[in-house]
Image (spheres, helix red, strand yellow):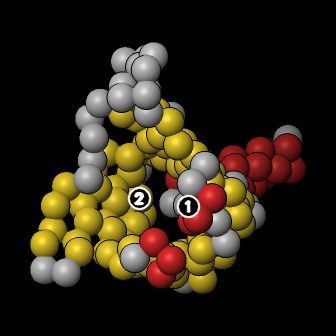
């Protein structure tokens, strides 16, 4: 009986440690709740409450999808974009290697961010630079973990 109880306690301890690790992990599905961009000396919100964006991160890849919330039917109201690829995470440095994107000029870009996870919130800040498009800006995005 003591042995069975000891095994049960061990299983519960290991399980609780694993679930805590998952909670603080970058892996999961995240919904964008705010976004700011800084270009030159101007900072402005780029968050659009008329769209929903999610980012899905597993152990090797990331993907993001953004679409309008009102089922837009024409090109002025219908919003959709998505992309993904492999990523690396070393300490708080998260680097996306964008292999797929509906705007093909962004493909093969490498984007480095500093990430912080606090409870169910992921904060991602870094530089988006695409020379051939003249893009060079700092982005600061905040995501909440989807349940």
**Nearest to the observer: residue 98 or residue 17:** 98
Q: Mark 2, residues whose alpha carbon is within 10 Å: few (<14), some, or many (≥20)?
A: many
**Nearest to the observer: residue 77 or residue 14:** 77
Q: Residue at the spot x=43%, y=20% of the render?
A: 74
Q: Secondary structure at mark 2?
A: strand
**Left or right relative to 42: residue 82:** right
Please report contact status of discs 1 and 2: CB closer than 8 Å, yes or no: yes
Q: Residue at the spot x=36%, y=33% of the render?
A: 51
Q: Residue at the spot x=27%, y=47% of the render?
A: 47
Residue 120's disc number:
none
Query: Height in image: 143 above or below 106?
Result: above
Residue to which mark 1 is pinned: 26
Q: Position of residue 136 (x, y in %)?
A: 36, 79
Q: Position of residue 56 (x, y in %)?
A: 60, 48
Residue 134 in view, yes or no: yes
Which of the two labelled residues, at mark 1 and mark 2, occupies the earlier sequence position? 1
Query: Height in image: 134 above or below 71?
Result: below
Mark 1 vs mark 2, CA separation in Å:
8 Å
Q: Quadrant of residue 108?
A: bottom right
Q: Secondary structure at mark 1?
A: loop
Q: Mark 1, residues whose alpha carbon is within 10 Å: few (<14), some, or many (≥20)?
A: many
Query: Height in image: 141 above or below 115?
Result: above
**Nearest to the observer: residue 73 or residue 8:** 73
Residue 113 in view, yes or no: no
Q: Residue at the spot x=36%, y=29% of the render?
A: 76
**Residue at the extreme left of the image, as rendered:** 42
Q: Quadrant of the N terminus?
A: top right
Residue to which mark 2 is pinned: 122
Q: Position of residue 88 (x, y in %)?
A: 66, 75
How many marks can you see?
Answer: 2
Q: Position of residue 86 (x, y in %)?
A: 71, 66
């Amino acid at each position: 009986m003591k042995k069975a109880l000891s095994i049960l306690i061990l299983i519960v301890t290991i399980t609780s440690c694993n679930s805590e690790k998952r909670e603080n992990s970058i892996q999961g599905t995240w919904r964008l709740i705010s976004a700011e961009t800084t270009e030159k000396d101007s900072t402005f919100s780029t968050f659009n409450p008329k769209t929903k964006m999610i980012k899905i991160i597993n152990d090797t890849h990331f993907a993001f999808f953004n679409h309008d919330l009102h089922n837009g039917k024409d090109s002025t109201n219908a919003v959709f974009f998505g992309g993904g690829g492999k990523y690396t995470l070393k300490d708080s440095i998260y680097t996306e290697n964008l292999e797929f994107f509906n705007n093909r000029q962004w493909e093969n870009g490498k984007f480095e961010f500093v990430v912080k996870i606090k409870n169910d919130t992921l904060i991602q800040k870094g530089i988006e630079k695409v020379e051939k498009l003249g893009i060079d800006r700092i982005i600061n995005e905040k995501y909440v973990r989807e349940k």
